[in-house]
């Protein structure tokens, strides 16, 4: 029997306990071996064990605890490093040079040029490097991806990918007026949650942000041009966006495809719009979000073993309309339009699938699902969207 892959995790906070451990722990091919947590182990005083997100030595007494990066990366037993700390580039580089495979939290790094350098280093070291775009395993996105791959919607002509918030309370803390790379909602939601913004990192609401750019690239590929509209709707004049619209246009056989990626903080709805995708064969309209994140936050650090963990409530299933009958069980024929319409069941969300793929890629059974090149392209989309916003022009892919 092959020994499990020994995992070392950098950081022991919100991200580690709510977004990684619940989906690492059920995987028999992975074994949590060590944590890098700078805080010293708590004393016997019970009060010292309850601060912030706790301490790894309390929750995992048999797992190694390192307080310095040098000691952590020198542990030859660690095969896979999962980076959940604020520092990304430095730790990715250290891990790769130490001969480890790497999972790094979103949004990879601050610039596409940094990403390129790390991708080349991973290739030189012969190691797996991947970014934690777990939102590909959301229930609604898995459903949309399945419909697109099966051709149920025909030739997709227009796709809107949303993640909106109605007047979030945590946005009041965004008082900076000058933009620096890695800040704003375009990073916070467009390409993942930017962990260098401490007040964002600990905000439960923002952790619901989807990886909208990654989802667009995964479904439709690299665009030929990017147009960006960035706004500050939180009541202050700032170059740090809280609202954005990014339009991706394509060429050749997809020249009539238009993809819109959108986030707004002015969106007063019970169930926020997620997807509106129209093709020659049908339309998929989806409101509401995958329940996995909320359930992981409710039980931080515990393995996601409940078979219903990723099951959506039927109330938030999307509506599928097709020109010909696709699902006779859930669709009914509308005599007025001649279309087949019905609530279409969402596939179960499966964040565990992300780490199942990572383990399989390390063992050589599968290709890595979230390629670092795609995460790099996501960063490039964001860079071009900001350039477009500043210049007031559509920017060709470069």
Image (cartoon, rainbow, N blue to C red):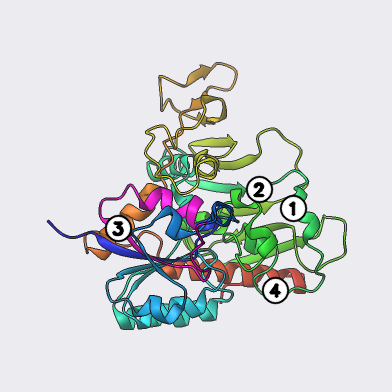
Q: Is residue 327 above or below residue 228?
A: above
Q: Earlier in the sequence, mark 1 or mark 3?
A: 3
Which residue is disc 4 drawn over? 387
Residue contact at pointers 1 and 2, CB within 8 angstroms? yes
User: Is 393 on the left or on the right of 220, as rendered?
Assistant: right
Q: Nearest to the eye among marks 2 and 3: give it.
A: 3
Q: CA distance from mark 1 to mark 4?
A: 27 Å
Q: Residue at x 49, y 32 (%)?
A: 312
Which span of residues is magenta-colored?
A: 16-44
Q: Earlier in the sequence, mark 2 or mark 3?
A: 3
Which residue is disc 1 drawn over? 170
Expressed as whole percent of the image width and height from the top left, the position of residue 367 reads 29, 62
Which residue is disc 2 drawn over? 205
Q: Mark 2: give few (<14), some (14-19) or many (20+) Cα within 10 Å.
A: some
Q: CA distance from mark 2 to mark 3?
A: 30 Å
Q: Earlier in the sequence, mark 1 or mark 2?
A: 1
Q: CA distance from mark 1 to mark 3?
A: 36 Å
Q: Residue at x 43, y 69 (%)?
A: 372
Residue contact at pointers 1 and 4, CB within 8 angstroms? no
Disc 1 is placed on an element classified as helix
Residue contact at pointers 1 and 3, CB within 8 angstroms? no
Expressed as whole percent of the image width and height from the top left, the position of residue 140 reads 50, 40
């Amino acid at each position: 029997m092959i020994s499990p892959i020994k995992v070392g995790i950098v950081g022991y906070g919100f991200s580690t306990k709510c977004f990684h451990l619940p989906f690492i722990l059920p995987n028999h091919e992975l074994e949590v071996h060590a944590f890098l947590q700078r805080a010293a182990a708590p004393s016997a005083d019970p009060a010292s064990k309850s601060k912030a997100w706790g301490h790894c030595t309390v929750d995992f007494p048999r797992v190694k605890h390192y307080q310095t990066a040098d000691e952590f990366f020198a542990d030859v037993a660690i095969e896979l490093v999962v980076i959940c700390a604020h520092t990304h580039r430095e730790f990715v580089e250290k891990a790769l040079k130490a001969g480890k495979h790497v999972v790094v939290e979103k949004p990879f790094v601050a610039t596409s040029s940094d990403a390129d350098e790390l991708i080349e280093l991973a290739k030189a070291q012969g190691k797996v490097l991947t970014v934690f775009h777990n939102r590909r395993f959301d229930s609604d996105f898995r459903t949309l991806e399945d419909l697109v791959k099966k051709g149920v919607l025909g030739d997709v002509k227009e796709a809107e990918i949303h993640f909106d918030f109605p007047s979030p309370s945590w946005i009041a803390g965004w008082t900076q007026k000058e933009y620096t790379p890695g800040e704003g909602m375009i990073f916070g939601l467009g390409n993942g949650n930017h962990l260098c913004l401490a007040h964002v990192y600990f905000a439960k609401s923002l952790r619901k942000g989807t990886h909208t750019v990654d989802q667009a690239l995964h479904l439709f590929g690299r665009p030929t041009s990017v147009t960006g509209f960035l706004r500050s709707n939180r009541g202050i004049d700032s170059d740090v966006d809280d609202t954005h619209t990014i339009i991706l246009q394509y060429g050749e056989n997809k020249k009539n495809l238009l993809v819109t990626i959108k986030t707004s903080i002015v969106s007063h709805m019970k169930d926020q719009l997620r997807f509106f995708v129209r093709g020659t064969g049908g339309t998929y309209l989806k409101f509401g979000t995958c329940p996995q994140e909320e359930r992981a936050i409710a039980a931080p650090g515990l393995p996601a073993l409940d078979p219903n963990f990723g099951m959506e409530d039927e109330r938030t299933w999307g509506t599928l309309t097709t020109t010909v009958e696709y699902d006779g069980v859930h669709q009914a024929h509308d005599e007025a339009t001649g279309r087949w319409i019905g609530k279409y069941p969402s596939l179960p969300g499966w964040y565990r699938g992300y780490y199942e793929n990572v383990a399989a890629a390390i063992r050589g059974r599968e290709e890595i699902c979230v390629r670092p090149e795609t995460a790099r392209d996501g960063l490039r989309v964001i860079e071009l969207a900001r350039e477009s916003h500043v210049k007031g022009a559509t920017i060709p892919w470069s």
